[in-house]
Amino acid sequence: MTKHRQIEREFGVPIAGEILNANLWTQTALKKLPDGPLDMTALFGRSAPLVLDIGCGNGRYLIGSAVWRPDHDHLGIDILPVVIRYATRRGNQRGLRNLRFAVCDGQRFLTQHVAPHTFAEIHCYHPQPYYDPQQARRRLIAPEFLAQVHRSLLPGGKFFLQTDNPGYWTYMRAVVSFFFEFEELDRTWLDAPRGRTRREIIALRRGLPVFRGWGTARVNLSEEEMVRLAEQLPPPVFDADRRLRELDRLEKQPE
Ligand SMILES: C[S@@+](CC[C@H](N)C(=O)[O-])C[C@H]1O[C@@H](n2cnc3c(N)ncnc32)[C@H](O)[C@@H]1O
């Protein structure tokens, strides 16, 4: 008898991997974080290059990466429990052992639960722009956060950043190069021409521009210099353009 492959789609775009029989499901939820740094070797039962996605949403990018790069271990963090439930369900159903998701604030996660020089890659796709100026201080991409990303990366580690918000991108471009050898991409990622994440797929379907870039942690950037940069660079104050709120509504629609 031919087994029916269970491929899931989101806005018509396939989600990597396939849903396995329940006896092969895994447990990708990391329900409790320790008081101090996470022991990644104990968590994954091996020592492999580590990939972190901050504000991972429903986990689409990490699930694909975990399927296609079984030799890497992956961790997704989001502040919103409901999106982590979507992410873990899909991770479990695909039987992935190199993937975990946890509910946590991104800045707090890096500061309290990550030892220095842990990750080979840190990804941040479409961080919340927070349209209300009163909430501007909740914006994740800020000098102190970038310093913390730099500290958390291995030497030569890579940072990936993306947004559909022009105001946020202008700000990101202004500050990110102080910490990373950063380059912008003028096309979609080669592995995901229809979008790496749910939010990117929505933006592309609406014909909106998406801004992408990546870079390696600057070498010879001392701790003192990073502290100085974190104090002196401007905070993320910009006009987030309320018209783009429509995208948030689409993103929150049930899957
Ligand atoms: C616009 S969505 C993008 C989700 C996903 N990266 C994507 O591209 O589809 C922003 C995500 O960041 C999460 N988020 C907002 N503030 C956060 C914070 N301080 N720490 C971690 N996640 C946060 C939200 O819950 C939401 O899932």
Image (tube, helix red, strand yellow):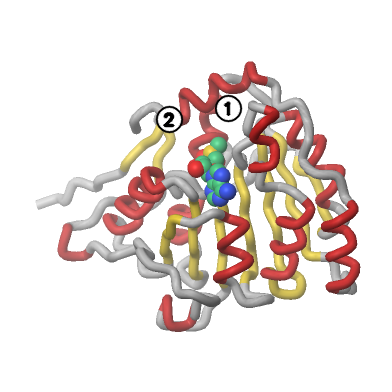
- Secondary structure beneath dot 2 equals helix
Identity, as a three-letter code, of the amino acid under mark 2: Lys
Binning the other alpha carbons within 10 Å of mark 2 as few (below 14), some (14 to 19) or many (20 upward) gives few
The mark found on residue 153 in the picture is: none
Q: Is residue 60 visible?
A: no
Amino acid type assigned to the residue bearing label 1 in the image = Ala
Q: Which residue is mark 1?
A: 203
The foreground one among 199 and 109 is 109
Picture disc at residue 252: 2
- Ligand 1 resides in the quarter of the picture at top right
Say left or right for 27 vs 37. Answer: left
Residue 111 position by quadrant: bottom right
Residue 60 vertical placement versus 93 (above, below): above
Q: Is residue 83 above or below residue 28?
A: above
Q: Which one is earlier in the sequence, the residue at label 1 or at label 2?
A: 1
Label 1: element kind = helix
Q: Is residue 120 left or right of residue 87?
A: right
Is 72 drawn above or below residue 203 in the view shown? Answer: below
Q: Residue at x 19, y 46 (%)?
A: 4
Q: Position of residue 58 (x, y in %)?
A: 43, 45
**Which residue in the rendered view is the most extreme toward the top?**
243
Q: Residue 238, image x and y in percent?
A: 78, 31
Residue drawn at (83%, 43%) of the image: 173
